[in-house]
Image: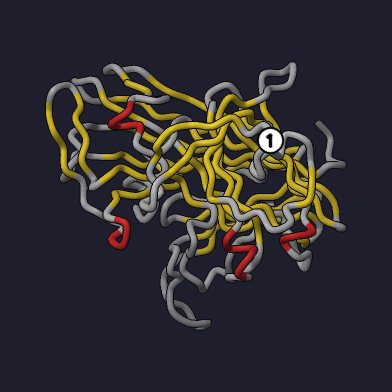
Amino acid sequence: MSALSPASPGPSGPPSPTGQQWTIGHGPFEATVVEVGGGLRTLTRDGIDLVAGYDADEACASGRGQQLMPWPNRIRDGRYDFAGTEHQLPVTEVPLRNASHGLVRWALWELVDLEDDAVTVGYRLHPQPGWDWHLDLRTTYLLDDSGLVVTVAARNVGTAPAPFGYGAHPYLAIGDTDLSDVRLQVPAATRVDVDDRLLPTGTTPVEGTEQDFRSARAVGATNLDTAFTDVLRDDDGAWRASVATASGTLTLWADEAFPWLQVFTAVARDRKGVPGIAVEPMSCPAEAFNSGDGLVVLEPGQEWTGTWGISPSDASA
């Protein structure tokens, strides 16, 4: 099944705040991708939410399902130096004085291809204040027997090397389960320490700390807005993080392109909208444009690609 829902006004009311809605399906799975930001609005199995999304007539809040390019997380004061030139980005996280989550999450993405079980969206990122380069961005959302598979590509179509980082911001749904009772597993040996502006100050091994979720355990009173690295990969090269409730277990996995992940629990703690725990695959941490940690430098004509996905515990691998 596939559907293309126009964003233009109709008899039922005004256009959607997230533009056109592209719906795909495979077996019991269904997903909806939106024009604004090219993000994931819904993912369900047999009508049950697998991600904590939002309705078609709502604006995206708390970064739900958004794509974070050409950097995830934060850049201090929006300033960075690249190839000897200082750049000043707009400060979009005003209370903390940071440039946050890239330049594309409110942009209008184009439909590249739509099939019954897959949709590809694209965006040409042009130069703008604080950003001097041309990137072609493509994201394919595919549903198969395992659930959702997301493949992202970024190609430098300009004439000079370009800095790049990627993150995604899906929330794994926890339904009616209280956050303290959710069992969380995060396959990473090191956490990133941050200051009061949520910018990195160093790293700490998770061994012996309340952020050690290498073995699945209840979240309890732990609050996380935490980046992790030194990820522990399975034999296929992917790491797998999981969120388990009485209804079952959801796993978010990511391939070798993602040495970092962020876990964010405040939405579930505060029951802010549909409750879920954000598990965010990232190619680099906050401040990568300044620190160089995990930063990808795309030469002209070079392409970066990465794949991640979401699977229920009893889906086919």
Instruction: Indicate the position of residue 50 as horizontal and vertical percent values.
Output: 72, 54
Which residue is rendered at x = 62% and y = 26% of the image? Answer: 231
Classify mark 1: residues with Cα within 10 Å, few (<14), some (14-19) or many (20+): few
Q: In the displayed orientation, state which residue is furthest to the front.
A: 208
Q: In this view, which residue lies farthest toward the left?
A: 85
| Picture residue at 57% right of the left edge, 58% below the top | 41
* Residue, disc 1: 208
Residue 312 locus on image (x, y percent) = 79, 45
Q: How far across and how far down the image is residue 199, in percent?
A: 38, 44
Q: On the image, which quarter does residue 125 sit in?
A: top left
Nearer to the camera, 235 or 217:
217
Residue at (61% x, 41% y) in the render? 118
Q: Relative to 170, is 72 on the left or the right?
A: left
Mark 1 residue type:
Gly
Residue drawn at 53 percent across, 50 percent down: 225
Report the number of discs: 1
Tell me: residue 82, above or below residue 144.
Answer: above
Q: Using the image as rendered, state which of residue 68 and residue 98 is in the foreground.
A: 98
Judged left or right of residue 15, residue 100 is left
Tell me where residue 143 sits by quadrant: top right
What element does badge 1 sit on? loop
Which one is in front, 10 or 263?
Answer: 263
Left or right of 208 in this view: 306 = left
Q: Can residue 105 be seen in this view?
A: yes
Vertical arrangement, residue 176 with respect to residue 212, above or below: below
Looking at the picture, tell me which residue is in the foreground, 207 or 121: 207
